[in-house]
Amino acid sequence: MSSSKPSPKDIVDAASPPPVSREKRPNPTPQSTKKEPYSPRSRHIGRSRIQTIVFGLGIGVVVALSQRSRPSCHLPEAWALCSKGQNSAIYTADLANPVVECIVVREKTIVDWGTKEYVKKTWGDRDTIGPPILGKRDTQKSWSLGEEVAKKGLKFKYLKKGEAAFPGFADAHAHVLQYGATRELNLDGSLSVEEVRERVKRYILSNPEISNDRGIWIQSSGWDQNRFPGGSYPSADDLEADEVLRDRPIVLARVDYHAYWISPKALELLGDLPEHVDGGLIVRGEDGKPTGIFVDNAMALVEKAIPPWTPLQMLSYFNTTIHDALRHGLTSIHDAAAYPPWIDFFKLVADRDALPIRLNLMAHIDSDEYWGGRLEKLEGYADHRLNVRSVKLFTDGALGSWGAALLEDYSDQPNNRGLMRMSTETIEEHVRRFIEDGWQVNVHCIGDRANHIVLNAFEKALANGSQKLRHRLEHAQILTPDDVKRVGNLGIIASVQPTHCTSDMSYAETRLGPERIKGAYAWQSLIRNGARFATGSDFPVEGINPLLGFYAAITRLDLNGESPHGPGGWFPDERLTREQALHGMTLGAAYAGNQEDIIGSLTPGKRADLVILDKDIMQVPPAEILKTKVKATLVDGRVFYGKF
């Protein structure tokens, strides 16, 4: 018997079902897509398939991920981190003690904070002072060092000049596997149809397997027609203009994942299409034929034809995302639509101690029928690395694709008020039943009509005044003045994405007009009216770096320091302060995930999740924030990225 270990690919391949055939699939029917909401293509991986993955990948996951999940350097059992005078700082995100000179960590937990003098006197200094003065700590407390450790004294570590330490950053709204799936072919920032074609062409030519097989589906995301000359949707024919792309099934998701742009070959493989899709749109030309653009619920027609992700692809995408997340200081991510097969996958990874960050999964199933009974809650799973205690509902589309549901017509598209992807009756029933079954309900709401309908549903379901489950409006992007007040009055959390504001500001007022725009991205208005908030990125829709969101939140400027209203920012009265922006990506996000008792601030008794930056983002000029780098990312007191 060979002593060599199998590679992750060997194990995955051996465990996988036979390859998905590229033969043409049965044509979708109008009945099968009538009310099916948008979901990523991998929803086709069913329970039986994921069980095959679970049994076959156990060792493979460990082999593939062990290096990623292993700390990059080791620290002693107990240690202290201190700043050096005015040249560095430790920000706790705890309002009672927002800046401290030192924190003390034992294993996974922060056990104390204070001045360096206090910490040395209380706990001892391994290098200079020796054992501490006993009796200064209550060794009966669960978070104390204990006498044996204390007698050895602490190892002190110091921030370098200009550095700053913070609680580990959280992204309160993101998509883990989708981010990894988009890294090989990325269309972000494309300024024309020609540039998109050129990027796809380079990708094809750089991958011999794809180049030599025109039957392989090519997928990517990131295009935005608002950046193209004229601002109109592209067409399927645009993907036939280059010989390299011709006669290939190509599916390109819009930057917000609310529309697909597909090639003629992909269109051919869809077969007969329905005339109408509830909650969706098949864009058609003057001749009545599909142009190649499918919006919101109509995207399901495309997804039925696309082969599902393989187990090896899922592993690859996961690895890519986790690596980039840790590199940018993220220690917690709220995944804003986790399908049951994905939950099984993440649970498997957590079971093998190969999940180096904390994941809060918002469960989602594509169905207008109530599906709460088909889910299993996970709370504090794998030592608080994995939670499934919330669900995600989708109500409307996005502003950029004219799919956000508005109370009045779009200013730039008369007779169009966007798309509601669920009926009002279904929304109300789902919200009520999920709350009755003890689920936190997080609802995608962009337009003022969608927000209004969902707030009505919450108001009815919460008539008894209970909001202990901390329900959320995901995006809370455009609201009427009255609904801005209702968010706070109902105790609903506004889960917002600051970079959406700066990405949309070039066209948002054109879509909404001068009055409605005042209720868009209205963060300070929400806060003044009592709303709690959390911030995220919605990656891969926006960049994964949380400092991009921090910068956008406090400036409302693009990366060049510009806005439609000048260098002072777009509607600057709605900017967040730096303290508010830090709260949104630390303690605010922890509260939104029901985890503020264990993470979110560098408070004694909480887990030692922290990030060290080479610049102090609370003090440097805004432009310097964009140049700031992560020096180290720690989870449970262990270094998973960088050096410390």
Image: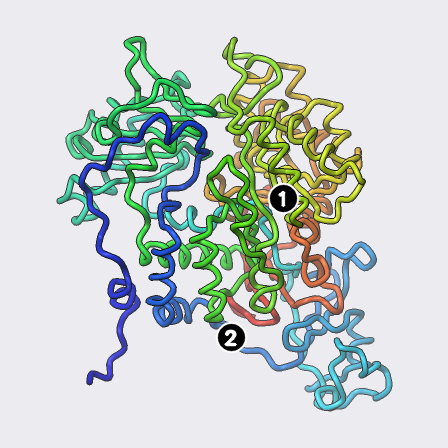
Q: State yes or no: discs 1 and 2 in contact (Cβ < 8 Å).
A: no
- With 483 as the anchor, is 387 left or right in this view? left
| Picture quarter with the C terminus | bottom right
Circle 1 residue: 434
Reading the chain from its start, which is encountered first: label 1 or label 2?
2
- With 175 as the anchor, is 80 left or right in this view? right
- Vertically, is 223 above or below 100? above
- Tell me which corner region of the image, top left, top right, bottom left or bottom right, holds residue 289: top left
- Tell me which corner region of the image, top left, top right, bottom left or bottom right, holds residue 105: bottom right
Q: Nearer the viewer, mark 1 or mark 2?
A: 1
Looking at the rendered structure, the number of numbered marks drawn on it comes to 2
Q: Residue furthest left?
A: 212
Res. 619 visible in picture: no
- Vertically, is 565 above or below 24? above
Q: Position of residue 140 (x, y in %)?
A: 81, 82
Residue at 62 percent of width and 33 percent of height: 556
Mark 1 residue element: helix
